[in-house]
Image (cartoon, rainbow, N blue to C red):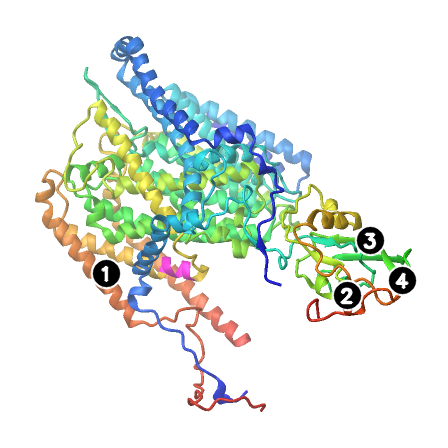
């Protein structure tokens, strides 16, 4: 009898799509909604401007600049919070789609046209799921841990210089950076350091071996990978004007058009890699690796508590990218080499800057996702080896080299422009190339097998292999 | 095994560029990006919109939910021989036998429960059954709200047969008789290469 | 005035003795309440010396949280919670330092203490014990009387010194004002690399020695394990 192939008739609930299904999956309706959402706010804003614009301007002119700045800072904080939370939702969909496409799948495509409404469904599901608190957990810490993770991820945002300063037509300025701290970068490092606690405490409080291992791993990993970031900041400090202020570091790049990523490509890669490790994402997601630890530190978490961890991870990605954009990628300047928007402090330039800044952040997050779905996970000893024997020595070497360069006077001159700093760029590129060559030379001198920790294996006696043509089985 | 039979395999050593990770990561990007952007057509062609459409399966071989066959007279074909529950590696079949009310067999199953959650769908029960009474169907959508619902009893298994007999007819309807009545064709009753070994 | 402080500190010492683990739940609560009263009283006494309303509110909050954290570090019977309250204390200290225009010291404190040292503490404590029960050796404090007496003496002496005339002037001298213009990172760096360069170098040598020692101990243990196995 020949093999009969066939698909059985439908027995599932989706045999007849409900009217709601038909509506939310219709691309025309989605397009109409998107159009309304895109068109209505500008129209509304214009109408509001026409109606209340002049009184508002008068009010702003009459207000004390300090109070105006305070109110504006509040608005910026609210705006950034809004963007981050909504971007997190969108990024979760993007991540699922990207991973699906990389793995030749379709990804979510049933809630709404192309799955565009999936974040809403996810959000509803997170809120409606049963919130399980297991019986023998340490309850206060169990509840506190996701809150710490989320709060810590969110409080780094005030020091990011989103769109520089805005000059008001009637004099005075507003800065879009909520807090212009003298310790800018150090503040972010300090907050990042606190981020470990969410993971470690979650792992410990769950009273679960897998979660515990996850927390322990996360702690060791984050401690190790903070060091390259700190050293990277140090290098920027040496070469820049000697300040920790994020907005000054960024202004220097936009003034010369010489982004730090061109001056310090190796350092950029190190900080980028360390950022991946700090966010606990693949290839460094040892704290939650499914094959060994079920879900690691958040094994016991469900519903909104789990969602907080999830949001914290994406918020960490956003803040990490924002810091990288500020420190290395020229902030809101669209193109390297030229200063298009530098010094242009009008309100429309600020709008463009804001969008370019977020565009760069989203680009970097795309890289995060691509890396996550391309590179396999490290083993834990490999992870530690990479940090302590690979990245930290290289970063330290870079610190020493940059110190020497600064000591002999090779330093970026913010007033000289791109051409004036060309020599500095050439020297830095040469230094980086030499360092890369040295690393390669060092690597080629030592040998490493493909797998396993085979450093201390005893000498294996070499067994003579069978000569060709003498096959056959014998029972010895 | 002789010493000469041992073939020594040496793990290839990584080159310096490979141990730098970066070139390898870029090569990985090439693969993933190719799948992402250049193979959309292949992806779409191979897609089955699952709940709307189902993928093609081999109806006679697919190992989905079990059924308990009925013979042409509409009686349960099982003779409660315990071969399937003995063969089951997951110990998920529970049978209680009783004296058969019919003259052509000695026993019949009073209870026949399969725990579909314990079952590993290996098909050993189907292989073991001497009278082709238990069979696996191509249905793989098993859902329930409780664990209790997932323990299928005799009525439910017979009901599955009623539901699936049009898609997958019983392989050998005549294999029930063990010569007790003598009025059935022995050639069919005896397992052959055409039926089962 | 100093007498009032001394009475407060004595009161606090008594409260601390009661609140240390091992005195029983009722006494522990009474002790905690006494300590909290002490915290509130001392903050209330310090507040009038501060400037604006914002400063006062921030100081009261941060000092209150910090002192509460400090009290719970030594009175909580479970080490993990103690470590957590230590973190609370460190964060509050960071806030107080920021209030004093010492942002660099604040962030250094956070990065080094909260970000590294306390994580290692937690690491060790969590590896040592898991579960929700209090271990028997944590249930009561070791030598509570002598500990409280020593703390009382140190705090009393310090308070007396601070409140005596010249020390108060000495402390009040480097007030804020210059810091606002040059920022708070550069002066620290310049001081570290000029006036205190010997100290920095000595600290570096000490850390190096500690690191070499750690490596040596680890090597020896590895060798011992090989012998045993």
* Residue A94 percent across, percent down from the top left: 41, 41
Q: Which residue is mark 2?
A: B130
The vertical placement of A178 against B115, above or below, is: above
Kind of element beneath mark 4: loop
- Of the two numbered discs 2 and 4 on the same chain, state the one appearing first in sequence: 4
Q: Is residue A112 left or right of residue B125?
A: left
Q: Between marks 2 and 4, how big is the CA–CA gap? A: 14 Å
- Pick the front one: A2 or A298: A2
Instruction: Return the disc, 2 or 3, that comes first in the chain's sequence.
Output: 3
Q: Which residue is mark 1?
A: A436
Q: Position of residue A424 (x, y in %)?
A: 13, 49
B88 to the left or right of A326: right
Name the image quarter holding residue A138. Answer: top right
Q: Are marks 1 and 4 in contact (CB under 8 Å)?
A: no
Q: Is residue A456 magenta?
A: no
Relative to residue A104, is residue C18 drawn left or right? right
Q: CA distance from mark 3 to mark 1?
A: 83 Å
Q: Which residues are magenta?
A: A382-388
Q: Distance of mark 2 from mark 3, alpha carbons? A: 19 Å
Res. C50 visible in picture: no
Q: Who is closer to the viewer here, C60 or A26?
A: A26
Q: Which quadrant does the C terminus of chain C fall into?
A: bottom right
Q: Which mark, residue A244?
A: none
Q: Are marks 1 and 2 in contact (CB under 8 Å)?
A: no
């Amino acid at each position: 009898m020949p093999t009969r192939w066939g698909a059985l008739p439908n027995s599932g609930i989706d045999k007849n799509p409900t009217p709601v299904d038909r509506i939310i999956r219709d691309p025309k309706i989605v397009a109409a909604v998107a159009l309304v959402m895109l068109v209505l706010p500008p129209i509304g804003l214009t109408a509001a401007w026409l109606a209340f614009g002049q009184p508002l301007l008068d009010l702003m002119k009459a207000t004390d600049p300090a109070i105006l700045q305070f109110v504006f800072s509040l608005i910026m904080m609210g705006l950034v919070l809004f963007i981050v939370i909504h971007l997190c939702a969108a990024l979760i969909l993007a991540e699922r789609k990207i991973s699906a496409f990389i793995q030749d799948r379709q990804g979510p495509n049933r809630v709404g046209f192309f799955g565009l409404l999936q974040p809403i469904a996810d959000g509803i599901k997170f809120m409606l799921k049963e919130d399980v608190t297991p019986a023998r957990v340490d309850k206060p810490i169990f509840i506190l841990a996701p809150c710490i993770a989320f709060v810590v991820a969110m409080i780094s945002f005030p020091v990011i210089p989103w769109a520089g300063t805005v000059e008001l037509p009637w004099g005075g300025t507003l800065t879009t950076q909520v807090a212009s701290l003298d310790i800018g970068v150090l503040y972010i490092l300090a907050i990042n350091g606190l981020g470990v606690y969410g993971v470690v405490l979650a792992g410990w409080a769950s009273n679960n071996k897998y979660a515990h291992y996850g927390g322990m791993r996360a702690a060791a990993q984050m401690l190790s990978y903070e060091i390259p970031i700190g050293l990277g900041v140090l290098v920027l400090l040496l070469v820049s004007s000697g300040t920790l202020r994020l907005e000054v570091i960024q202004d220097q790049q936009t003034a010369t058009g010489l982004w730090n990523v061109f001056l310090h490509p190796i350092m950029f890669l190190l900080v980028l890699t360390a950022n991946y490790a700090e966010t606990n994402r693949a290839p460094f997601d040892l704290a939650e690796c499914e094959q060994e630890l079920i879900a690691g530190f958040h094994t016991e978490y469900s519903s909104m508590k789990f969602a907080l961890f999830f949001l914290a991870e994406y918020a960490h990605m956003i803040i990490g990218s924002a810091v990288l954009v500020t420190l290395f990628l020229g902030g809101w300047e669209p193109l390297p080499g030229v200063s298009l928007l530098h010094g242009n402090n009008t309100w429309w330039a600020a709008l463009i800057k804001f969008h370019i800044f977020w565009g760069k952040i989203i680009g970097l997050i795309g890289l995060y996702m691509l890396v996550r779905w391309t590179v396999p996970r490290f083993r834990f000893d490999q992870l530690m080896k990479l940090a302590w024997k690979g990245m930290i020595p290289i970063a330290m070497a870079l610190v020493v080299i940059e110190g020497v360069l600064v000591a002999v006077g090779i330093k970026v001159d913010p007033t000289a422009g791109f051409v004036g700093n060309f020599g500095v760029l050439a020297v830095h590129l040469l230094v980086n190339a030499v360092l890369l060559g040295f690393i390669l030379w060092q690597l080629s001198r030592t040998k490493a097998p493909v797998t396993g920790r085979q450093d201390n294996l005893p000498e294996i006696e070499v067994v003579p292999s069978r000569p060709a043509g003498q096959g056959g089985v014998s029972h010895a | 095994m002789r010493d000469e039979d041992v073939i020594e395999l040496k793990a290839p050593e990584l080159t310096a560029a490979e141990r730098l990770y970066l070139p390898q990561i870029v090569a990985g990007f090439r693969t993933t990006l190719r799948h992402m952007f250049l193979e959309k057509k292949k992806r779409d062609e191979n897609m089955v919109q699952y709940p709307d459409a189902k993928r093609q399966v081999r109806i006679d071989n697919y190992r989905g939910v079990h059924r308990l066959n009925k013979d042409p007279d509409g009686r349960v074909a099982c003779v409660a021989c315990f071969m399937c529950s003995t063969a089951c590696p997951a110990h998920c079949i529970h049978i209680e036998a009783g004296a058969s009310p019919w003259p052509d067999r000695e026993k019949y199953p009073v209870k026949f429960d399969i725990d579909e959650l314990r079952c590993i769908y290996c098909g050993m029960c189907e292989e073991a059954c001497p009278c082709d009474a238990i069979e696996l169907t191509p249905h793989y959508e098993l859902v329930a709200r409780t664990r209790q619902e997932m323990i299928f009893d005799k009525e439910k298994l017979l009901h599955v047969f009623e539901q699936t007999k049009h898609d997958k007819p019983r392989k050998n309807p005549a294999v029930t008789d063990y010569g007790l009545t003598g009025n059935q064709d022995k050639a069919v009753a005896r397992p052959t290469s055409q039926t089962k070994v | 005035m100093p007498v009032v402080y001394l009475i407060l500190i004595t009161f606090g010492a008594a409260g601390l003795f009661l609140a240390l683990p091992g005195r029983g739940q009722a006494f522990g609560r009474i002790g905690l309440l006494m300590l909290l009263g002490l915290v509130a009283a001392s903050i209330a006494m310090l507040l009038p010396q501060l400037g604006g309303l914002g400063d006062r509110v921030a100081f009261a909050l941060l000092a209150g949280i910090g002192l509460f954290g400090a009290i719970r570090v030594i009175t909580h019977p479970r080490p993990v919670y103690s470590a957590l309250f230590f973190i609370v204390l460190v964060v509050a200290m960071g806030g107080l330092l920021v209030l004093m225009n010492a942002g660099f010291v604040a962030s250094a404190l956070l990065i080094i203490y909260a970000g590294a040292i306390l994580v290692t503490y937690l690491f060790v404590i969590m590896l040592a014990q898991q579960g929700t029960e209090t271990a028997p050796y944590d249930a009561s404090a070791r030598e509570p009387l002598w500990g409280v007496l020593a703390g009382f003496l140190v705090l009393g002496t310090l308070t007396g010194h601070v409140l005596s005339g010249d020390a108060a002037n000495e402390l009040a001298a480097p007030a804020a004002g210059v810091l606002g213009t040059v920022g708070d990172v550069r002066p620290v760096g310049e001081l570290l690399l000029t006036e205190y360069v010997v100290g920095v170098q000595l600290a570096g040598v000490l850390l190096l020695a500690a690191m070499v020692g750690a490596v040596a101990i680890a090597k020896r243990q590895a060798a011992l394990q090989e012998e045993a196995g």
